Amino acid sequence: MKKYISIILASLLMVSCVDTIILPDDKTVDEDFWKSKSDVALMVNGAYKSMLTDAVMARLIVWGGLRSDELLPNTGITGVLTEDLRDINLANTQPDNQFATWGSIYSVINNCNIVLSRAAAVMGEDPSYTQGDYLADRSQMLALRALCYFYLVRNFRDVPYHTTAYMTSSINRDLPQTAPATVLASCITDLLEAERNAISASAYNDWRRVGYFTRDGIQSLLADIYLWRASVMHNASDYEQAVIYCNRVIESKKNQHVAGRHEVGDKEFPLANGGEAFADIFVTQNAEESIFELQFNGTNNAAIALQQYYARVSSSNNAPYLYAPSKFHDDTEGIYVKTTNGMDYRLSNTFNSQKTVDEYDVVNIRKYVSKSTATGNVSNTSENVAYNNYNAQNFIIYRLTDVMLMKAEALAALAQITEDNAPEGQDTTDVTRLEEAFHLVQVVNARSLEAEQDSLLWSTYKSKKAADIEQLVLSERQRELAFEGKRWYDLLRYNYRHVEGVNYNTILAQQGGGFVENSQDMLNLMKQKLGSSGDAVASKTATEPRLYLPVPLADLKVSSLLLQMPTYSSDETISKN
């Protein structure tokens, strides 16, 4: 019976956040289960495992990458899935689009809520389950739940928020949306508690070091949320908190460093050098510089999302669902520009096999689906990996260079605030913050080059203005974190920093029109992959509501409280059941 329950909870795909059965309507089954430390461990691991479903992984890829400038759908493959990807790419997303659904994320949230509501009582049943064990488990579930809500806010903005464990079908789950400022404040409160009771990052020396939500992972998530909220609300104190939490993670990683690994030359940060980094991070996995990875073991079919979206859709079709635009691979104008002294290792390790599909020139993706480190420029070669050999690849949520560049972004934003508040005619450039931000970018960039790029030096850099450093950070994040589900959120933060009047304390459906216009600079970045379709897509994405996905049609039909995101309402006539 215990095995049966764990399988249900670990494998559940939540069809709707308001219409879900988590356990059978048998109270005896539930009461008989929560008796031992091992029962809690099953449920904690089940919550992590529910992040590994194909539905969740597909959304982490599509939500974080396809809506940005770094991915294009393979229009050479026919079917509903490809049509839905194409609609998202062209800003034609409808409420019935299969990727405009949140049920799989709410499934993870509910699994976390179940542990949080039941685990404490086990201390009275099993003496071996101590308060320390409980607090560590609670810390992980609070963090995992906060991560899920953070994904929801960044993709749907106005979402139902609940901390109730839904155990039976009889519980009322008809919930209204909550303003994003409220959701993020709740996430921060939970994470601050989780941080106090977190597992030390050095508690394990196996996969659990980065497979569990340790203190490093919690602090990385806190930095990410503070950076997001600061960008939206133009809040200097949140930027400062982001810097504080980035510093804690960076110092922790330095303290955990194991001598003798392939770190950068000056050993200021424990980063593998460029020739070793790809293998260390994406082939061997669970690298020293990693912080939190979703763990796949090679037998879980959930990892099929990585292989289908980045490598090949089936054993008989070598084409993936998604490609990268070829202009990002260009040797002279792309994001990885060759220098006079050599090349950026990330150029050959991130892409290969340039081709034309439909109207787009595209390249295949190597990151996450390659089994080896590239040597030299492999842009015109392809890798033939057996279809079932992709599904042991972890998916990285946070790693050290991500945190370093988050800190650089926050520092540049704080310097910009100083510039904006300067008395007219006075130069109050915040050189200290800008130089530190520049240095972080320089370190991340330099570790990936065959030879040092002399042009990327603070003493000779073209500008020491915050706006230019902001652009430098944004570009380096794209180079370093391509296809890791980060780029769309980077663009959204950039957008919010350059617009005024955002009301994050009220859901958009209740704001009555006059929505904030998005930054043209951000729209220009977003549309550059689209060629002749770019202007039309930018026009459709002109205001804040279109930065977000519509409320899922299936949920609108069963909920009397959910309100559709403005500008989507006219796309579908909805009759509430």
Image (cartoon, rainbow, N blue to C red):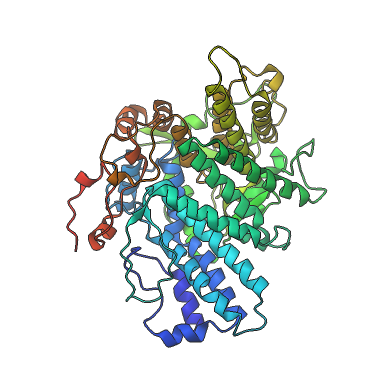
- Extreme front residue here? 423
Q: Quadrant of the C terminus?
A: bottom left
Residue 325 percent location from the top left of the image: 45, 34
Look at 55% across and 41% down and name the residue there. 238
Would you say 425 lies left or right of 5 here? right
Q: How many numbered marks does the figure carry?
A: 0
Residue that appears at 51% across and 67% down: 47
Seen at 34% across and 47% down, the residue is 507
The residue at 72%/27% (across/down) is 452
Pick the residue in front: 553 or 357: 553
Residue lying at the far top of the rendered structure = 425
* Quadrant position of residue 521: top left
Q: Nearer the viewer, residue 139 or 342?
A: 139
In the image, farthest residue toward the right: 259
Residue 95, percent from left and from top: 27, 50
Residue 277: x %, y % from top left: 68, 43
Would you say residue 543 is visible in this rendering?
A: yes
Between 465 and 343, the one lying in front of the other is 465
Q: Is residue 373 visible?
A: no
